[in-house]
């Protein structure tokens, strides 16, 4: 079929017409994508640590889709807009009129810009505010080095609009460039080519030549040093954690090489990691070319590096092929969790991969009972809620189990061919669940008939809960842990008889997560004395122990738990603990700890924990 000029320009920008056509169902954006699309952004921003703001302008290169349109609508949240200029057909710059609407609690404030002609480019001069939901500003004392301030972004899901006036929907994709100015002793990095950031001089230039959705635009600035791990990978980190991070994650190149062979060549050039302060609210964020990583996974034994495999997997599922709306989040996270596990199998072996499957599946099944049934569907309906509400184990692990189910039914060879073809078909595009179902039906279900019906696939995607025949991964290693646990609980074995010296962190987590929730204080004390669990240096193992101890009323943990809650801000490792403390009669203690910890938490973590104490 002959492409129209419009279609060709959209494809060059990495935007599919089908993805743009879905914008009407993205209830979380004000953008008028039917009229105009930003195909390239240029950011020119000063990082002002004193006032906790980014100040400057963003320049939009515009591709008009409606010949009669003269209006550009952008998403903003808590931004101060100074002025808007536009470049007309004659190349001259003119002042544009604009209106900033009243702030909506979820979507922010609609910015409507009016032009006298269809502008080639538009510049919005603005500054962010200290409360920007997508930025965190840390004082020197809140960092590892204690010498320099630190700032970083977290744009997913719709927080890019809190630091850039932008068409903030994953249904569109844009390239970007940036000039970022900082104090001279502070290094800035972005989700882009960071080669111009190697010289620390306070004036940095960045280029992202591949089109990405706005939630993947990212920035960090602080006392950052750089160290290569391989020809394609490196670490940016504060000096205190740099060498430990390199030692922990030096298998990253092997992960890339294995994934290339399974799913096609890595499309982004370099794959570097930015180690963030402990306040980062997530395990990691898959910002292209520069994944943002929590230091809580630097365990010293590579036991938690599946997080790196997850963020790397997003380079195919999520960054390359993207959900068109946040109700389609499972297309990003389910595929990524599946690919993550395949990477772990390739690099660390089948036994470890199955243990991680089993832990994740058990976590999902435990969580399903605490989630409203409609929210256990893969194709979630948010009905106006904040898209941050879409993030649970459902899109990640139920999505992964669905893909494991298909792999088991069709065989790995056939399923790998399907996944590789899917990534190639939708490369640099966004799609909806409906589009995926159509592709699945054509390229897998009908191609190999009589194995899995379309109705069964739709049950997985559109119905709540897990199908009765869902995979339930089990590990021989965990069966041995269960047998040893049962023997100890019955008194047939002492703790010294348990083969814990040979346990991986996965076996420890299985052990702790499956101990009785009414274990006696005597047994709790013996466990702690034998294994020093209260003072564990592995963040995941400490979390599992604290959850058990809070539920069982084991008071000896509380000094260490106070330190845990105030020293890290990763939501996975703090939110369930606050909830459990409130549930088990420790509300006043938890409130006091939170009041002390809250200033060091990211705004996203603050909002989540605030809701617990309302």
Image (cartoon, rainbow, N blue to C red):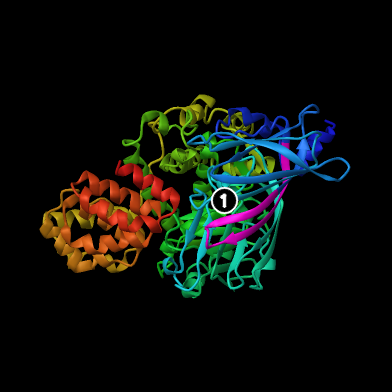
Q: Is residue 590 visible?
A: yes
Residue 362 % position (x, y)? 34, 45
Q: Is residue 516 visible?
A: no
| Residue at (44% x, 64% y) in the render | 295
In screen coordinates, is 122 left or right of 407?
right
Q: Is the stretch drawn in magenta largely helix, strand or loop? A: strand
Residue ranking furthest to the top: 455
From this view, report whether residue 389 is shown above or below residue 268: above
The one of 107 and 283 positioned closer to us in this rendering: 107
Q: Which residues are magenta?
A: 37-58
Residue 498 % position (x, y)? 22, 64
| Residue at (65% x, 57% y) in the render | 45
In screen coordinates, is 34 left or right of 154?
right
Q: Find numbered disc 1 in the image and state the secondary structure of the residue it sits on.
A: strand
Residue 571 % position (x, y)? 39, 51
Residue 23 % position (x, y)? 63, 31
Q: Is residue 41 magenta?
A: yes
The one of 390 and 606 positioned closer to us in this rendering: 606
Q: Which residue is mark 1?
A: 128
Quadrant in which residue 531 is drawn:
bottom left
Badge 1, how many Cα within 10 Å: few under 14, some, many 20+?
many
| Residue at (29% x, 51% y) in the render | 577
Q: Quadrant of the C terminus?
A: top left
């Amino acid at each position: 079929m002959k492409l129209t000029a419009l279609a060709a320009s959209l494809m060059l920008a990495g935007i599919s017409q089908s993805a743009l056509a879905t914008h009407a169902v993205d209830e979380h954006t004000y953008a008028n994508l039917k009229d105009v699309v930003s195909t390239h952004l240029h950011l020119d921003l000063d990082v002002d640590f004193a006032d906790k703001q980014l100040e400057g302008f963003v320049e939009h290169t515009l591709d008009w889709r409606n010949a009669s349109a003269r209006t550009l609508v952008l998403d903003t949240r808590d931004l101060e807009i100074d002025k808007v200029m536009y470049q007309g057909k004659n190349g001259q710059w003119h002042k544009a009129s604009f209106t900033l609407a009243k702030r909506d609690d979820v979507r922010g404030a609609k910015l409507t810009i009016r032009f006298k002609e269809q502008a080639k480019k538009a510049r919005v001069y603005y500054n962010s505010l200290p409360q920007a939901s997508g930025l965190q500003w840390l004082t020197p004392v809140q960092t590892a080095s204690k010498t320099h301030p630190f700032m970083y972004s977290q744009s997913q899901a719709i927080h890019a609009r809190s630091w850039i006036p932008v068409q903030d929907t994953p249904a569109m994709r844009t390239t970007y460039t940036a000039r970022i100015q900082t104090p001279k002793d502070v290094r800035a990095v972005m989700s882009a080519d960071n080669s111009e950031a190697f010289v620390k001089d306070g004036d940095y230039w960045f280029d992202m030549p591949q089109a990405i959705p706005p939630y993947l635009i990212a920035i960090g600035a602080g006392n950052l040093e750089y160290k290569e791990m391989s020809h394609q990978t490196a670490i940016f980190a504060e000096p205190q954690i740099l060498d430990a991070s390199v030692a922990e994650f030096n298998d990253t190149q092997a992960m890339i090489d294995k994934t290339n062979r399974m799913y096609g060549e890595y499309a982004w050039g370099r794959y570097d990691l930015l180690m963030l302060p402990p306040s980062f609210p997530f395990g990691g964020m898959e910002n292209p070319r520069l994944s943002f990583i929590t230091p809580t996974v630097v365990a010293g034994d590579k036991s938690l590096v599946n997080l790196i495999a997850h963020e790397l997997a997003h380079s195919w599922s999520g960054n390359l092929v993207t959900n068109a709306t946040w109700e389609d989040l499972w297309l990003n996270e389910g595929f990524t969790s599946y690919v993550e596990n395949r990477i772990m199998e390739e690099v660390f072996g089948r036994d470890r991969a199955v243990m991680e499957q089993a832990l994740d599946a058990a976590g999902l099944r435990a969580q399903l009972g605490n989630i409203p049934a409609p929210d256990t569907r893969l194709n979630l309906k948010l009905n106006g809620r904040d898209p941050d509400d879409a993030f649970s184990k459902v899109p990640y692990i139920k999505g992964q189990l669905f893909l494991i189910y298909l792999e088991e039914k069709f065989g790995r060879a056939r399923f790998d061919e399907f996944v590789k073809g899917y990534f190639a078909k939708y490369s640099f595009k966004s799609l909806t669940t409906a589009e995926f179902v159509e592709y699945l039906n054509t390229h897998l279900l009908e191609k190999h008939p009589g194995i899995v019906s379309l109705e069964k696939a739709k049950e997985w995607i559109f119905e709540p809960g897990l199908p009765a025949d869902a995979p339930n991964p089990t590990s021989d290693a965990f069966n041995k842990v269960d047998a040893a646990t049962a023997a100890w609980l019955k008194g047939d074995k002492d703790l010294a008889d348990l083969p814990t010296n040979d346990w991986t962190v996965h076996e420890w987590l299985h052990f702790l997560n499956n101990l009785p929730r009414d274990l006696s204080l005597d047994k709790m004390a013996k466990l702690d004395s034998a294994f020093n669990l209260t003072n564990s240096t592995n963040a995941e193992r400490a979390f599992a122990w604290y959850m058990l101890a809070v539920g069982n009323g084991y008071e000896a943990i509380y000094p260490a738990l106070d330190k845990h809650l105030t020293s890290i801000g990763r939501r996975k490792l703090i939110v369930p603990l606050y909830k459990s403390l409130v549930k088990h009669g420790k509300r006043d203690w938890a409130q006091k700890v939170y009041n002390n910890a809250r200033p060091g938490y990211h705004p996203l973590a603050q909002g989540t924990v605030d809701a617990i104490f309302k």
